[in-house]
Image (tube, grey):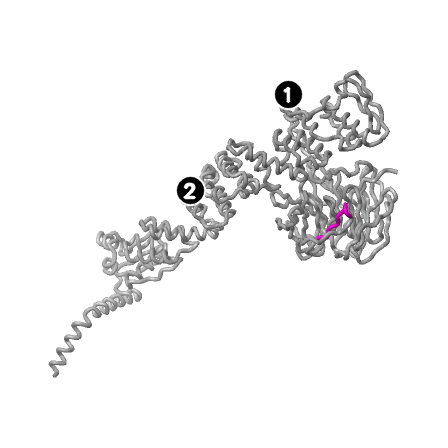
Amino acid sequence: MASSRKTRSTQTTETFTEPVAGMIYAKMLTSTMSSLRDRKEICDMTIQVGDESFPVHRIVLISASNYFYELIKGDKMKDGVLQLEDIKSRAVRGCIEYIYEGKTSVTMDTAFDILSAAEKFNLHDLIEMCLEFLSANISVENCFNSKMAFEKRGLSTRAQKVDVFIARNFELLARTDKILNLKRNDFSFYVRNAESDVGLLYQAVKNWVIFDLSNREQHYPVVISCITNSFGVKFMLDTVWPDPLTAGSKPAKDLISVAVLEDVTTLAECLTRENCFHAHEICGITRHGNRSKAQRLVNLFIAENFDELCRTKGFVTLGKDAVFEIFRSSKTERVSDKLKWHVAQKWIHHDLGRRKQFFPALLSLIRLENTDFDFLQSVVRADKTVQEFDQCKDMIMDAFYAIANLGGRKPLTLKSDKPGKAASLTGDAVVSRQRSPSPCMAPRKRPLNAEDAPENFERAKKTPDFSLADVDYTETQSQTGKPHLAIYDPDTGLLKGLNIGKLKWSDLVSTTVAKGVFQGVVAHQNILYLLKGADLFTLDVARKTWVRRASKQEQPAMWSKLLACENQVYVLQNGHIDLYDIERDRWVEKKPFASLCVGFSSCLLLSNIYVMGGLSMLRIANRYDLSTESVIEIASMMTGRSHAAAASLNGKVYVLGGSSEVALSSIEWYDPTADVWTTGSQMQKDRSGLCACVYDGKIYAVGGKPHRTRQTKSFDTIEVYELAKEGRYKWRIFHELIAVSHFASGCVLNIPCE
């Protein structure tokens, strides 16, 4: 039995414990050696890394690594100490742990260091362990280094896995500086395959190029060609084309030009007031087959939006053919001919030396007979360019004759100094003409063509540009009278006027005092509108009386704002706009608007209402597009303000003074093209609750008071923002201000002289 049991036991040991015994023995051996290392017993070698040393056993290192075998065998150590350079101590510690125990801890912080050390020590299993760890833990922080590690070892499958990760997470990577050091081919590959917003992709391209501009600027066209198909026509017109990187690269401009003009139908759908001049520029430099058709579409768009676009800087950059086509278009027939005159002058004077020859032909496209005598006499006839061309004098005389026949005014006779020459204009009334066979007296039979002008000319120095942004040239606007600052005091109900030329105050008209309701004035086409509570009035200047108009159904909030343009009076309130139709004398339905709060400021610019600031929205600014009735958030102001004044000048929006814990004298202006605010020169005084008026290229700051004072009256001065001798806009005290209440409102009004 014993023998039997012994035999059975022996058989069991042979079949069960043989592999286990090896494992147990190996574990016991590694545990013992590791314990000896921890206790620093029987260690016959030291690895020195910087200030840290690792006591080890030579036989253990030799058994694990050929690197140590060759090193120890060759006796390349000094006094049993192996000095290691260019390697981190934590990496050496990890490798020693792996040699002694067959395992080590690999983390995101140590993976690449241990991988580098394992390669140095020829620890192949540890290398695989690190690579497997990186493959399983790809992140924004390690993806590029991981791919380099995989490609270095020919692990294409793992490298492709990283590429997929980068494409899916490019938006996150683009916000870091990790992409900036990529080579062009790698960067182009990632941009081409990225799953990201096109705007962010383009910004990433710009950042990559600018990071090493001198070496990478040449690669800009190649890189953007990878994503041109993703751009879309509107994005290329709005963002890519005006970018300085594109402007400075002919290959890039050619690339964008081809992409934009590939489908003219799409181009037509993408044109906006902001990008149409970019499209025009593209049509002017390319030889694409769709160029002519695209140019006609762009010109048609500009003609359809002439009232707004003619006031922008882009209009003066148009070529001769485009300007003449726009002036001839049926889309501009409804446009005021006074406005056309000023636009023609602005375009001619932008490059007077080259363009003056075209002036008679361009003037022939303006119906001067649709203006009035005062405009012809004081504006057109007085123009120096007109005096240089007999054709222009003939056109003016034709217009005078037409107005005299239609207007019923007492005519004066034209005096001609020499037979056959254009007669001079004398007197203050409309003139009539004595019919004569003189060529200069004959009505013109056809418009002149631009080609009638001489071909040879010399380039002259450009004359200073001027802006139409703040001028309302409408057919009904009065050209008579003297400009006044009309200031309305809500506490007294009195409207006073300051003659800007003579600096003399006068009482214009008064109204009954109303407390606790909104009161404000605004001028449109030289008619002053007063909204007092729910009641609307217009001013009869000649009789010095108020004329009642249609009343609102409900009173506006005390902190509302009053604006006017395009035969509409706008009352801005929180969440909606009330509209008054001037021609129909009635209030129309409310329009949705942005959220507003007490103390906001507002003004009009190119059929857009801009609203800024307020007590709880100090820096927030929005633009309301009257054509689309949409609210667009724009860049925030640089300084938070409430109870500031706003005005538009030279195509910019100005915000003046106001308060932000204290009253402010600072101003800032907004450029709609760049969506950027810029600080302007400070006013002479801190002003909160002021009003602003614009006239003749100047801004007048009226009233206002220091913040947190008990006084109810405003400052007793008016400041003017004007172009100083040194060529910069500055503020100066303009005139004394009669006593008015805080938050008085004002506008500019032409008042006939008595």
Residue 111, picture quadrant: bottom left
Q: Which mark is residue 454?
A: 1
Residue closest to the eye, 380 or 264: 264
What separation in Å lies between label 1 and label 2 (alpha carbons)?
52 Å
Q: Is residue 561 left or right of residue 50?
A: right
Q: Vertical placement of 403 versus 544: above or below?
A: above
Dot 2: element: helix
Residue 615, picture quadrant: bottom right
Residue 659 in view (yes/no): no
Quarter that holds the N terminus: bottom left
Residue closest to the eye, 623 or 635: 623
Q: Amino acid at mark 2?
A: Arg
Magenta stretch, main secondary structure class: strand
- Residue 581 is inside the magenta segment: yes
Dot 1: element: loop
Q: Which mark is residue 184?
A: 2
Seen at 82% across and 46% down, the residue is 737
The residue range painted magenta reads: 577-584
Residue 157 in view (yes/no): yes
